[in-house]
Image (cartoon, rainbow, N blue to C red):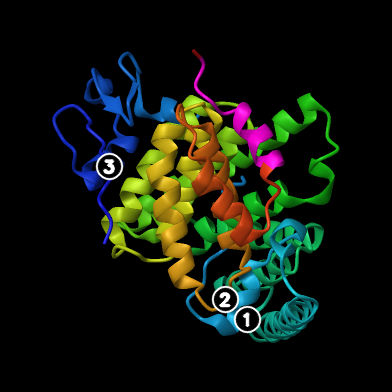
Amino acid sequence: MFEKIEKIVFCETDDIAEIHATLFSDDPGFFRGANFDGCDVTGLDKPELLFDGVSWRGVVVSDKKRASRAFRNAEMREGLTKSEKVNAAAGEADEIRQARSDLALRIAQFGPDHLNVGFAQVNLGLALESAAQWDDAIVVLREGLRIAEALGTDHGLLGVCLSGLALALREQPNVAGMAGDERTVLFRQIAGLYRRAYKHNRRLHVELHMGTATDLSNLAGTYDALGDRRRARRIAALALATSRKVLAPGDPRLANTLNNLGAMHLKDRAPDRALPMLEEALEIRETAFADIPRHPLRINTAGWLATCRLALPEPDEAGARALCTQYGFDYDERARRAAQCRPLT
């Protein structure tokens, strides 16, 4: 359906699985002379130097009965009708009650430190995250992480706890008011959690899967929030290439990585590179959510695309106006944003 728009070349290979494998390599020579998403990484001593949230905070789900996971926070709820907000909140509350009950039953049956209890902690933590109860989610996921670390690394619990905790820390309400140094320390901690999750999951699962791409996308978003745009783009490009490797064309989950990398290119004043990614992402999301015209994921990508069209060296004003009309954006506001994303001459 879509033309492949990203290609990664690493020295003697462009095999995605081999590229991922080298992230654990101690051979510094593999990266010599490499080119990653157009970024020269010649001179990197170790692959780990590529790794010193939010990526997109919504979660696309195929089961619409669990669609509340796509509405994680206030920003994601914009555009929903009152009844949709009420239904989402009711579904989240029911999910939390079920998760708490399941956790209590497992503790009674297995004791507080059993693997099954750890997974129940994760389920409760994710349910709390879906309801944007970030502080409670942090407490629960830290307990899940404690159990996971005590049981070793030969199970999937550790990776889920690490990535879940990273998201909760990223989304906690006090982040916006943090001073610069405090925020930087937090985001470095978050990056460390996502990095650990990625490395653990790659060791645990030989075959690439969507979780691999998600870990990388989250890590890229964290570096982007830290202002490390170059590193963020590299990792986001690998996330996109991995997504294309494991997903069918048009899969709704592919839109997440397309949206993320396209937004990064746009913020880096490269609208020509961002344009095909954002167009593909919006096409996927409009197809996936054809019956929900005001779906937050559609609105988010459409907003980026409208800004991108106005940031082009030869602005596509007609295309931008069409999106503004369809999605209810303020055209002048999009134009002001585009002015900050145009290539420097």
Residue position for label 3: 21
Task: Compare marks 1 and 2 and give the one earlier in the sequence.
Answer: 1
Task: Compare marks 3 and 1 and give the one earlier in the sequence.
Answer: 3
Residue position for label 1: 110
Circle 3: residue type: Ala
Above or below residue 40? Residue 248 is below
**Badges 1 and 2: C-beta atoms under 8 Å apart?**
yes
Of 312 and 322, the residue lying toward us: 322
Specify the segment rendered in magenta.
Answer: 332-344
User: Does any portion of residue 249 appear in the rendered image?
Assistant: yes
Residue 116 disc label: 2
Of 132 and 299, the residue lying toward us: 299
Residue 343 in percent (x, y) is at 49, 22
Which residue is at a point 46% across and 41% down the rendered structure image? 261
Query: What predominant SS class does the magenta segment belong to?
Result: helix
Q: Is residue 272 left or right of residue 166?
A: left
Residue 191 in percent (x, y) is at 58, 38
Of 330 and 295, the residue lying toward us: 330
Circle 1: residue type: Phe
Residue 84 in percent (x, y) is at 73, 79
Would you call the spot at circle 1 few (<14 residues within 10 Å), some (14-19), or many (20 or more)?
few
Task: Compare marks 2 and 3 and give the one earlier in the sequence.
Answer: 3
The CA span between labels 3 and 1 is 37 Å
Front position among marks 3 and 1? 3
The CA span between labels 1 and 2 is 8 Å
Q: Residue furthest left?
A: 12
